[in-house]
Image (cartoon, helix red, strand yellow):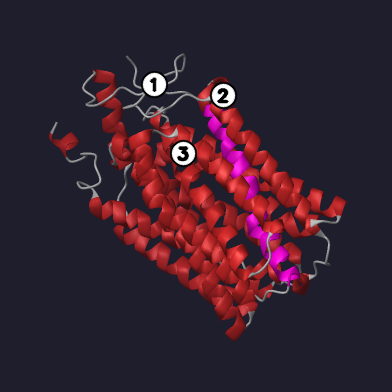
C-alpha cells in the first residue's frame, strides 16, 4: 500500500511531470511545424513540377502511413517496456531528419525524411498523451489532453512561423537544418533527465478497478474483451466491433484528411494567390495557434458538458472554415478562415482522445489510444492521396477544399448517430 500511495493520480499531485510532458510535446510540435510552411511552398526547388499535386502530397503519404502504424506499435510497446523508453526511441529516430533535408537532391529525399518524422511523431507524441492520461484523474482527462494538444499545436504554428523567417535570412535548407537539429537534441536531453516513467500509475489504477476500490464514476468499458487482450483483439475492438470507438476512429480519419489539406494545399493555394513565405507563415500560424490555445478551453469544456457535442461541433466548424477559403480573398479574410478552422480543430481534437481514454481499461488504454491514433494519422495518407487526386484530376485546388468540407460534414453526422457519450460522470454504468 505504501508503494501505491506514491502513485496518486491528479494534476496537482503530479504537476512537475505534467509540465515536463507538455514541454516534450511542445518540442514534438516544433519539429513537425517546421514543414508546415517552407517545404510545400518551395517544393519546386526540390523538383516538383507545378500541378503535380500527387507527387507533392507524397511526403504526407509516407508520414501518415508510418506515423499511423507506429502509433499502434508505440501503444503496445509502451505496455511492455514503459512510456519513457518509447519517448526516447522517438527522439533517436528524429536525428536523420535535419541532415536529409539539408542534403536532399530531390523530393524523394523529403519523402524518405518524413518516414523518420512519422516514427518520431508516432512514438514521442503518443507517449506524451498516454503519460498525461496515466497520471490524471478521469474528470481531468479533457483538460489534460487539451493542455497536451495545446502545447503541441501551438508549437506547430510557432515552428512554421519561425522557419519562415529563418528561411528568409539563411535560406530554406539551412533554416530547417539548424532549427530541427537544435530542437531534437534539446528534447532528447530533457526527456532523458526529467521525464519519469508513468506506467506504474496505470497499473495501480488497473488494480483499483479489479478490486472494486476505484473511486469515482464507473466508466463504460466495452464488454466481451479479455482482461489483457492481444494485439488483434484490441485492434478489432477499437476499429470495428465497438460502435463508439469505431465512430471516434472515423472522426479521427476525417480530421486528418482536413489537416493534410491545410498542411500542403492551403500554403500552395495562398502562394498561387501571390502571398510570400512570411505572409503564408502568419496565416498558417494563426490556424495552429488558435487550434493550440483554444484546446485549453475546449478540453476543460468537455469535462463539464461531455465529449460528444464538442466533437460534432468541431467537425462541422472545421468544415465551414475550409469551405470559406475559396469564397473569400485577402490576407485578413484568409486569416479569419484559418482562425475558424483552428477553433473547429480545438473542439474536436483533444476530446476524441479523451473519449477514447474514457472507455478504455487501464490494462489496454495505451493500445486503445494507439489504435485510434493509427486510424487518425493514417488519415494523413488517405487525405493526401484523395486530395492530391481530386486537385490533379480536376486541375483545381479549390475542389479539394469542397471535398474536404463534405467529408467533415458527413463525419459529424455519422458520429452523432453511432457514438455514445463517454464521459463517466455524465454517462456512467448504472
> Judging from the image, what secondary structure is the residue with disc 1 in?
loop
Q: Residue at x 83, y 62 (%)?
A: 51
Does 367 appear above or below 61?
A: above
| Residue 261 lies within the magenta run | yes
Q: What is the magenta segment's predominant secondary structure? A: helix
Dot 2 or dot 1, earlier in sequence:
1
When asked about the image quadrant of residue 392, the answer is bottom right
Residue at mark 2 to residue at mark 3: CA–CA distance: 15 Å
Image location of residue 103, percent across then percent down: 68, 74
Dot 2 or dot 3, earlier in sequence:
3
Tell me the number on the disc at residue 305.
none
Image location of residue 119, percent across then percent down: 56, 52
Question: In this image, 40 relative to 415: left or right?
Answer: right
> Judging from the image, what secondary structure is the residue with disc 2 in?
helix
Residue at mark 2 to residue at mark 1: CA–CA distance: 18 Å
- Residue at mark 2: 417
* Magenta highlight range: 245-273
Q: Is residue 140 visible?
A: yes
Q: Residue at x 49, y 67 (%)?
A: 158
Q: Residues within 10 Å of mark 1 (few under 14, many from 20)?
A: some
The number of discs equals 3
- Residue at mark 3: 310
Image location of residue 39, percent across then percent down: 66, 68
| Residue 79 lies within the magenta run | no
Q: Do the numbered discs 2 and 1 sit on residues whose CB atoms are within 8 Å?
A: no
Tell me the number on the disc at residue 220.
1
> Judging from the image, what secondary structure is the residue with disc 3 in?
helix
Q: Nearer the viewer, residue 423 or 203?
A: 423
Q: Is residue 232 visible?
A: no
Q: Quadrant of the N terminus?
A: top left
Image location of residue 88, percent across then percent down: 43, 55
Amino acid at each position: 500500500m505504501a508503494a501505491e500511495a506514491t502513485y496518486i493520480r491528479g494534476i496537482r499531485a503530479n504537476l512537475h511531470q505534467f509540465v515536463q510532458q507538455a514541454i516534450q510535446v511542445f518540442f514534438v510540435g516544433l519539429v513537425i511545424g517546421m514543414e508546415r510552411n517552407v517545404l510545400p511552398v518551395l517544393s519546386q526547388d526540390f523538383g516538383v513540377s507545378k500541378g503535380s499535386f500527387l507527387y507533392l502530397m507524397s511526403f504526407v503519404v509516407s508520414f501518415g502511413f508510418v506515423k499511423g502504424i507506429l502509433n499502434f506499435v508505440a501503444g503496445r510497446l509502451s505496455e511492455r517496456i514503459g512510456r519513457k523508453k518509447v519517448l526516447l526511441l522517438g527522439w533517436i529516430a528524429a536525428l536523420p531528419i535535419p541532415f536529409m533535408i539539408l542534403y536532399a537532391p530531390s523530393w524523394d529525399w523529403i519523402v524518405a525524411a518524413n518516414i523518420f518524422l512519422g516514427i518520431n511523431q508516432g512514438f514521442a507524441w503518443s507517449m506524451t498523451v498516454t503519460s498525461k492520461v496515466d497520471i490524471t484523474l478521469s474528470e481531468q482527462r479533457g483538460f489534460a489532453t487539451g493542455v497536451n494538444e495545446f502545447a503541441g499545436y501551438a508549437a506547430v504554428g510557432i515552428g512554421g512561423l519561425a522557419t519562415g523567417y529563418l528561411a528568409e535570412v539563411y535560406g530554406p535548407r539551412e533554416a530547417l537544418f539548424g532549427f530541427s537539429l537544435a530542437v531534437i537534441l534539446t528534447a532528447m536531453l530533457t526527456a532523458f533527465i526529467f521525464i519519469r516513467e508513468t506506467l506504474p500509475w496505470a497499473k495501480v489504477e488497473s488494480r483499483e478497478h479489479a478490486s472494486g476500490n476505484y473511486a469515482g464514476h464507473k466508466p463504460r468499458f466495452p464488454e466481451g474483451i479479455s482482461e489483457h487482450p492481444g494485439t488483434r483483439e484490441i485492434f478489432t475492438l477499437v476499429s470495428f466491433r465497438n460502435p463508439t470507438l469505431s465512430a471516434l476512429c472515423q472522426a479521427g480519419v476525417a480530421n486528418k484528411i482536413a489537416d493534410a489539406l491545410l498542411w500542403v494545399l492551403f500554403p500552395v493555394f495562398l502562394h498561387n494567390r501571390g502571398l510570400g513565405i512570411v505572409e503564408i507563415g502568419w496565416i498558417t500560424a494563426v490556424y495552429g495557434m488558435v487550434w493550440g490555445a483554444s484546446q485549453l478551453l475546449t478540453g476543460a469544456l468537455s469535462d463539464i458538458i461531455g465529449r460528444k457535442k464538442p466533437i460534432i461541433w468541431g467537425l462541422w466548424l472545421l468544415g465551414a472554415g475550409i469551405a470559406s477559403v475559396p469564397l473569400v480573398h485577402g490576407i485578413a479574410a484568409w486569416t479569419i478562415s484559418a482562425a475558424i478552422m483552428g477553433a473547429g480543430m480545438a473542439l474536436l481534437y483533444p476530446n476524441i482522445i479523451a473519449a477514447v481514454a474514457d472507455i478504455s481499461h487501464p490494462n489496454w488504454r495505451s493500445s486503445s489510444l494507439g489504435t485510434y491514433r493509427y486510424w487518425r494519422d493514417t488519415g494523413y495518407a488517405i487525405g493526401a492521396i484523395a486530395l492530391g487526386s481530386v486537385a490533379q484530376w480536376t486541375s483545381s485546388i479549390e475542389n479539394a477544399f469542397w471535398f474536404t468540407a463534405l467529408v467533415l460534414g458527413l463525419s459529424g453526422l455519422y458520429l452523432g448517430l453511432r457514438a455514445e457519450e463517454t464521459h463517466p460522470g455524465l454517462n456512467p454504468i448504472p
